[in-house]
Amino acid sequence: MDLTLTPTETAFRDALRAWIAANAPRDWEAGQLRASMQEHFAFLRRWQKTVYEAGWAGVSWPKAYGGRGATLMEQAVWTEEMARAGAPPLANTLGLAIIGPTIIHFGTDAQKKRYLANILSGDEIWCQGFSEPNAGSDLAGLRTRSELRGDRYIVNGQKIWTSYGWVADWCALLTRSDARSQKHAGLTYILVDMKSPGIEVRPLRQMTGESEFTEVFFHDVEVPAANVLGPQGEGWKVALGTLAHERATLGVLFQVQTRRQLDRLIEIWKERGEPGADISRQKIAQAYVENEVLRLNHLRAISSIMRKGAPGPEGSILKIGWSEANQRFQALAQEILGDYGQLAAGSDLAFDNGAFAYSYLRSRGNTIEAGTSEIQRNIVGQHVLGLPKSY
Ligand SMILES: Cc1cc2nc3c(=O)[nH]c(=O)nc-3n(C[C@H](O)[C@H](O)[C@H](O)COP(=O)(O)OP(=O)(O)OC[C@H]3O[C@@H](n4cnc5c(N)ncnc54)[C@H](O)[C@@H]3O)c2cc1C
């Protein structure tokens, strides 16, 4: 496979590079690490609006819905260039990376028209309501009920670990619409307005100190039947589309972010000229090798999605790759930085205003979010290697 950019991709990259150089905020990270979660999110939302208005949001989405109709390879170039330049991420992470693509795939024309442009502009932020207290890895065991009465569904139940629940305008909600059904059957995927009466959001505090995710309770929440995404009762199929996008696409972002941090770590390490450097040298080189392997594997996966039209179970290989490589890298950064590496934002002695301490703590969730490593290995074993089911 030839992974060099085509002339069209190179022109795309150069135009984007020039736009980023002229428009992306500089030196924003230190200030943002001290900002409250709300202030930080408002900053990211403003940045997303700027990117959208210049026509650089959701570049691979259809032109009719506000995208550029670019290829997935150009979308990957976009992610790399933004991260390489140190531009802020866009606010609507889940809307852009997984829920928008699911609406593009399964939505009616009316749904695409209603939701997609607002996802791109960041005017409507999305969260993903899948996990429940007794249905995480075993997602098909979910019990949140949606009952069709006339032209609306009545929703009752509870979701947990809902990232962005505290700020979301809409929720992609997986529900059980057939009370007598079990497991994967009888599920329906609905799009729920988070301002609907009967929704209660409670923050969950994480070890980073943030409350990035939440519990969401639904008490007799009314949702128009027109908000079903895909066929009623076939929500599992739609959810698998969302999960495949999550596993296949989020990794590109993490890989490039880790690469930026690795470059910064090398800078610090060189400045300090540490004795005992040989061990660090070996480990830093190993981290670079892992990151480069991830980069090439992502490009390979993207070209496979471009050929097949949709991500497959191979996304689980990428998910295991980026999440575990990032945890190894964060541990290495702590080892090299020593005690100061653990200081959080606010301490004058912290490296990069606590960025390394934050990302070390945040990386623990990488092997859980979007499906745990054990579940990804089950998928690889069963669906890629054809091994028998484990349970
Ligand atoms: C940072 C973060 C953000 C998240 N954001 C969202 C979100 O926005 N929306 C959302 O819906 N969910 C979200 N989640 C939830 C996430 O999807 C679940 O935590 C995950 O699927 C695991 O489910 P669980 O926590 O119930 O663990 P459990 O399913 O209870 O698993 C517990 C342990 O048992 C292991 N295990 C379970 N079953 C098997 C098996 N069959 N074989 C081998 N081992 C097994 C697991 O690997 C794990 O180690 C988020 C999680 C994190 C950490």
Image (cartoon, rainbow, N blue to C red):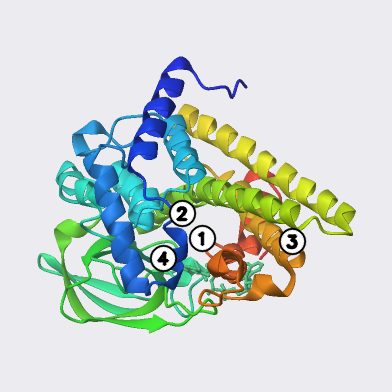
Q: In the rendered structure, which amino acid carries the disc numbered 4?
A: Gln
Q: Are marks 1 and 4 in contact (CB under 8 Å)?
A: no
Q: Which of marks 3 and 1 is nearer the N terminus?
A: 3
* Residues tagged 4 and 3 counted as in contact (Cβ below 8 A): no
Q: Furthest residue to the left? A: 150
User: Between tags 1 and 2, which lies in front?
Assistant: 1
* Residue sitting nearer the eye, 138 or 83: 83
Q: Name which residue lies at 41% across and 33% down.
A: 17
The dot on residue 370 is: 1
Q: Which residue is drawn at 39% across and 77% down?
A: 214
The residue to which callout 3 is attached is: 332
Which element is circle 4 on? helix
Q: Quadrant of residue 93?
A: bottom left
Instruction: Say whether marks 1 and 2 touch (CB < 8 Å).
Output: yes
Amino acid type, label 1: Ala
Packing grade of label 4 (10 A; few <14, some 14-19, many >=20) is some
> Is ligand 1 less than 8 Å from the beta carbon at label 2?
no
**Residue furthest top as drawn:** 7
Local secondary structure at mark 3: helix
Instruction: Tell me the crowding category of disc 1: few under 14, some 14 to 19, or many 20 or more residues within 10 angstroms, Cα based.
Output: many
Picture layout, residue 361 above or below residue 6? below
Residue 266's place in the image compared with 301, above or below, is: below
Q: Mark 2 points at which residue?
A: 243
